[in-house]
Amino acid sequence: MATLDLGIDEVAAVAPVARSRRLGLLFWGAVGWTIFILSAAALANVLPLPSPTDMDMLARRAPPSRLHWLGTDGLGRDELSRLLYGARVSLTVGLCAPVIGIAIGGALGLLAGYFRGRFEQLVVGSMDVLLAFPPLIFALAVTAYLGQSLLNLTCILGVLGIPAFMRVARAATLTLARREFVIAAQALGATHARILLRELLPNVFLPLLAFFLLGVAVIIVAEGALSFLGLGVPPPASSWGSMIGEGRESLEIAPRLAFIPAIAMFLTVLSFNLIGDTLRALTDPRQGML
Amino acid sequence: MTEPALLSVEAVAVDLPTPRGNLRAVDRVDLSIGAGRTLGIVGESGCGKTMLSRAILQLLPKKAKLSGRVMFDGQDLVRLDPEALRKLRGRSLAVVFQDPMTSLNPVLTIGTQLIETLQEHLELDGPAARIRSAELLAAVGIPAPEQRLAQYPHQLSGGMRQRVAIAVALSCEPKLLIADEPTTALDVTIQAQILDLLAREQRRRHMAMILITHDLGVVAGRADEVAVMYAGRVVEQAPTSALFKNMHMPYTEALLAAIPKIDAAPHTPLPAISGRPPDPTRPMEGCSFSPRCRHAAGQCYREKPALVAAETLDHRFACFHPIQLAAGACA
């Protein structure tokens, strides 16, 4: 038995080193950018920035200067300030919409995969209907009825994300619910609530979390597309998508007005994708080891 | 058996609907087991052993149909309401599964799994449950139990995990433990340790045990009584010593012959049972073993043999042409 103890300790001691080496520079770069953009967006009103809505008609499309680090846009508003305030909108939507998806979709998927039967048919059926409905028409209809606002935008994108989360949660639950540890828990007299919360949820949560981070990236792009089409937050508030849309008008004179928010979006989406992928890769081998 | 049975299974049948038709997994099985006794259930894969154990626990797949009675401690489990059944499970009935790789939750520590079970059933507070968990792990032969509580299942070996699974099953002092092929996924040296552990804990707790296996060798030294199952039916049932001394059903004999002998010369062909078990979705007219049986004759293909008593009342078998009975008194 002493040899067994030794073996386990060795594994425990070696594993973290190997893991951090495998993560690589790219992952830490992604984490760094994410932290940077998140804190910059959170501190946007504390930082010594010019107002994002004050127009300076004498300095329209001004090149970068000491006053305007990234220049000004077509209406003479500070580009950096708009970028950071826009990050607030894009990240709020990007993080909150998948939260709606993961909460509702995850719960539905877990329940559907566990209880099966009629309930599952109902859930899967209604999700198929939601998937079949053209998302752009849905977004247009909701904004036409309820108006453009950050909350509406978040809800639209959140609801559109529910089916995907439901499918991930249901697929994971289906394979897990047949494992013996679930039957063992039932045989020990566990209630349905206990099996769902203590046995299944911790197992389903790992793939859901990895999918969540990929979802954030998708939603940021989707928000950009909606704002580009004028369905996003109402002006004068900025988001990355609307900034790209406004920059399009002066693409030939000052291409940076479209490219700067595009680069910010590209880096953020790439970072979330990288982090999500790495986390999924980290959770996969553990599933294999079981 | 004079004392009243702890568990008696009466005419239990399990039907599973499949796309190819109704599958009768368990066909009118009668069994009983007294407190503190061990019943071995032996049979090849797919003969309904596991379905029978699930039927006893009322953990059949949702679509399965169960008929008959499962009397446990004076209550019919089939008709018990779900809440009463839930309270009975764990506290009175427990189960150990075949594969320790999948019978523990991979993302919870061993301590969490044990402690929560204890808190739920025995209403112990946190520290008391923790101490009790460590004692249980020590009882099932796990060294350094305090440290093990903080570990995850994948950090333990297969034999260790099966010990943990047994500790979880034993945690609430059940009256009946169902061990569903507890050693099939383990290597031979660990098998004996796990079986000895089960036997020791069973004696200490005066617990009844149903030992399900496909290996007659496993039940030989450990079960008080053995039931041999084939195609969903019990085909022979007897006290262990009587069964091995005097088996009547050709299937039992064939199962025993299929165990490799250690004193056989190298390269001796193993007498396997030819053919395959019958398709359970298509019920047969006669004895379900008749297509593979050396002794089968006319009647075997037309009628199903009933379970009849042999020399003693405890020994029952279902065969028209029992072996070794020609000289003995046939009932």
Image (cartoon, coloured by chain):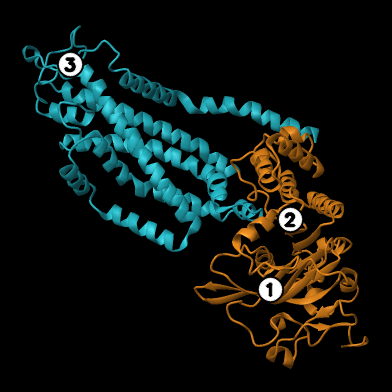
Chain colours: A cyan, B orange
Tell me if mark 1 has few (under 14), some (14-19) or many (20+) residues whose alpha carbon lies within 10 angstroms of its own: many
Residue at point 17%, 39% (across, down): A147
Residue labelled with disc 1: B69
Q: Could you tell me which secondary element the residue under label 3 belongs to?
A: loop
Badge 1: chain ID: B
Alpha carbon separation for disc pair 1 and 2: 26 Å
Distance of label 3 from label 2 (alpha carbons): 71 Å
Between tags 1 and 2, which lies in front?
A: 1
Q: Position of residue A224 (x, y in %)?
A: 23, 34
Mark 3: amino acid: Asp
Q: Left or right: where does residue B249 sit relative to residue A247?
A: right
> Along the polypeptide, which appears first: circle 1 or circle 2?
1
Residue at the disc numbered 3: A78
Residue at image position (87%, 82%) is: B310
Indicate the amino acid at tag 1. Arg
Q: Which chain carries label 2?
A: B
* Residue, far left: A58
Is B261 in front, or is A39?
A39
x and y percentages locating residue B263 in the rendered image: 89, 62
According to the picture, the residue beneath numbered tag 2 turns out to be: B182
Which label sits in the foreground, 3 or 2? 3
